[in-house]
Image (cartoon, rainbow, N blue to C red):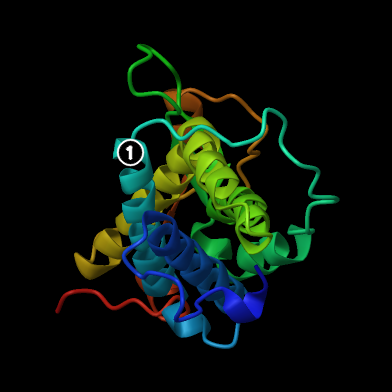
Amino acid sequence: MSDATLHATSQDPDDFVVQIADQVESFLVAVTEVAKGDEPDSAVPFLLLEVSQLLLAGGRLGAHEDIVPEERYEPDLGPEPDVDELRERLAVMLDPIDVYSEVFDPYEPRKAPVACRISDDLADVITDLRHGMAHYRAGRTTEALWWWQFSYFSNWGSTASAALRALQSVVAHVRLNQPLDDLNGLDTDQDLGDDALAEEAGKVMVEEIAGPLGLRPVK
């Protein structure tokens, strides 16, 4: 299945796989466009919207019965497309709010939050989604659905959810005109607890990030 036939009219738009592929493709295209930096003023609200819509597809995959691939072994797709440039562009664009703290599993007690980056999260999600899209474009629709469902549970679902919480928090802080803790300079390789995170975090007033990232506080 080529790019030209990705949205062919011969495909039933009610087919589950077509709907999921459309949502995945929309996310891939949108985030790639955002990363170009042509419209930085709308980056955060746009990413909030796109990640929210992607997680709707994830929720549908999560609620679906287990999808079993047609082949026992996954076909070789060759080398994965490089996402480093996209990751770096997003990191530069989101620099004031890129780093945030996250607890990976809310059901594991007493786990200290760790520092993460929205740019890393989005690049990792895109890597997973592109892998499934390669199967879809090759006509292996069941394989594509299996991969998207499996990787939703194992990686991109929780990663996108964490990024969504961070993006929503930024928008809320700005719209409610509340100060935002700055995690810039925090080493994302460090395993830091609450106290260490608090010591590392400085104060950044909302107005320092609202304009460049296309956000406006509530008057």
Looking at the image, which is closer to me, 182 or 62?
62
Q: Which one is nearer the viewer's eye here, 140 or 205?
A: 140
Task: Please report the residue visible at 52 percent of the width from the left and 81 percent of the height from the top.
Answer: 40
Residue 118, percent across and down?
53, 53
Residue 38 vs 71, above or below: the answer is below
Instruction: Identify which residue is drawn at 51% across, 27% down.
Output: 196
Q: Residue at x 61, y 48 (%)?
A: 128
In the displayed structure, would residue 115 be above or below residue 205? above
Name the quarter where the C terminus is drawn.
Answer: bottom left
Number of numbered markers: 1
Percent across and percent down for residue 119 are: 59, 56
Secondary structure category for the residue under label 1:
loop
State the residue at coordinates (28%, 78%): 216
- Is any part of residue 180 visible from this angle? no
**Residue 85 % position (x, y):** 76, 65
Amino acid type, label 1: His
The reply, left or right, for residue 86 in relation to residue 143 is right
State the residue position of label 1: 64
- As drawn, the residue found furthest toward the top would be 109
Q: Nearer the viewer, residue 23 or 51?
A: 23
Task: Assign the N terminus to one quadrant of the image.
Answer: bottom right
